[in-house]
Amino acid sequence: MTDSVAEVLSQAEGCPLHQLNPMHPELLKRPWGMNRRLRHEAPVFQDPVSGIFFVSRYEDVVRMAMDHRTFSSKMLSSTRALSSTIDSEILEIMEQGYPQVATMLTQDPPLQRRYRKFVDGAFSPANLKALEPFIERTANELIDKFIDSGRCEFLSAFGVQLPLRVIVSQLGVPMSDIALCRKWTEAFIGNLSQQLDRGGLIQAAKDMLEFQHYFAARIEERRLEPQQDILSKIVNASIDGEKQLSKAESLSMISQILVAGNETTSASLSEGIWLLIENPDQYELLRENPSTEMISRFVEEVLRISSPSSNMFRRAAKEVVMQGVTVPKDAILFARFASANQDEEQFPEPESFNLMRDNLKDQVAFGKGVHHCLGAALSRREMNIGFRVILERLENFRLAEDASPPSFSANVLLHGLSGLDLAFDKVR
Ligand code: HEM
């Protein structure tokens, strides 16, 4: 850590609250100290710069997730929720595409439920069961590529690839277009991060436009010739006799599935391996007993600690008082899932990584209530199978000799490692 980073972090823990800038990139990367302080001193804290209310305690975050009438998710997009103005060049690019439409994540019931009905079936237990051999085969193929070298950059070699391949196959996109899907995911994430300069935002807008045109063409194809994939379900389903979704609605749903389905699971897979390196006693526990139950415990605790969807926005549909703070109508709030998962009132010794916690299932990494993650069961399967295959084939995880400890990337809504230089031995 450089001095300036250390300075920002310690200032955050010691500065008067009105001087705190919770959106500072260093605090987005390493939010734990600040989160602890906010939970204790200002559980509902208005960021003086952005005006956003940060809600940090477990009980309040759960209240927000469960009460969609007071805490609305309805916005055109998460980016629009966070910035009031849009650059004219970016607007020009957007005008060449399809209009933004609020669907699942950015919509309230009853419309939100209607959109979910189009895709819920694709994530049914039977469909996910049928997907298990593909997940296992893909995990093995990825490991085959790097196992002989004894090291890899785990995030790009495995963490990113497993969920990306699964979601691309489920959407029905050819594997030859996987690099494009990755590029578009990065554009959406960059756009959400609030960390791009103007040039970066313009490039992201161009990539998102390319995404729209690519999938608009696939939508046309699926209308003419439906396949066994999520795209065909979105395009051709007619729920309760209602008309089919428009192209703009379909594109909004596809972008949410692509982005949410990739980045978050990648982050948890990679942080899981890092947590094993940092916690040799828990690694030993898992190695001694790699049963289905223990791997499932491991997955839940990784989800709690990593909480890759760290903040989700809401808009106050009416004035509301929380923890003695009056939040005015139309204010933007963050439901801080990552901070809730570290709340000491809910999880004793919250920073310790402990597979044997007795309330692992209380973690809220996938949210709660009507917006509870569409892909939670898929993601859990990817993690349970992915980690099992890794533990069967690789052992003695450590940082590669010349590597520095991994750092986290700065993003307002998402949290995850920016890379992991891993060394390992083959299981004999
Ligand atoms: C570790 C992996 C994942 C995490 C931590 C995660 C987290 C979340 C959270 C916290 C929410 C609730 C948002 C809110 O309340 O505003 C959510 C919703 C959602 N997630 Fe995930 N997610 C993950 C994986 C996935 C996957 C694999 C998919 C798709 C295949 C997916 C698709 C969605 C969608 C579409 C929504 C919006 C649902 C709605 O609003 O009705 N997620 N996710």
Image (spheres, rainbow, N blue to C red):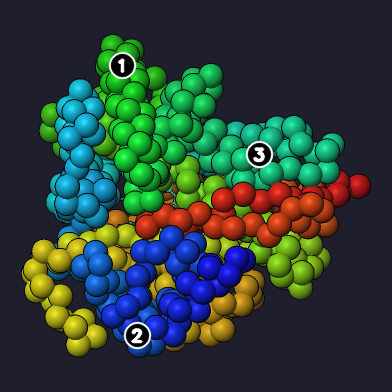
Q: Nearer the viewer, residue 60 or 44?
A: 44
Tell whether 27 sits left or right of 159. left
x 31%, y 16%: residue: 217
Tell whether 170 sits left or right of 205. right
- Cα distance in 3D space between marks 2 and 3: 43 Å
Question: Is the residue at mark 1 in contact range of ligand 1, meaning its CB lies under 8 Å from it?
Answer: no
Residue 50 on image: x %, y %: 24, 64
Residue 284 on image: x %, y %: 79, 68
| Earlier residue among tags 2 and 3 | 2
Mark 1: secondary structure: helix
Q: Which residue is mark 2?
A: 16
Q: Which residue is mark 1?
A: 217
x 15%, y 66%: residue: 331
Q: Which residue is mark 3?
A: 157
- Cα distance in 3D space between marks 1 and 2: 54 Å
* Residue 136 in view, yes or no: no
Q: Nearer the viewer, residue 203 or 139?
A: 203
1 and 3 marks in contact (CB < 8 Å)? no
Mark 3: secondary structure: helix
* Residue 186 in view, yes or no: yes
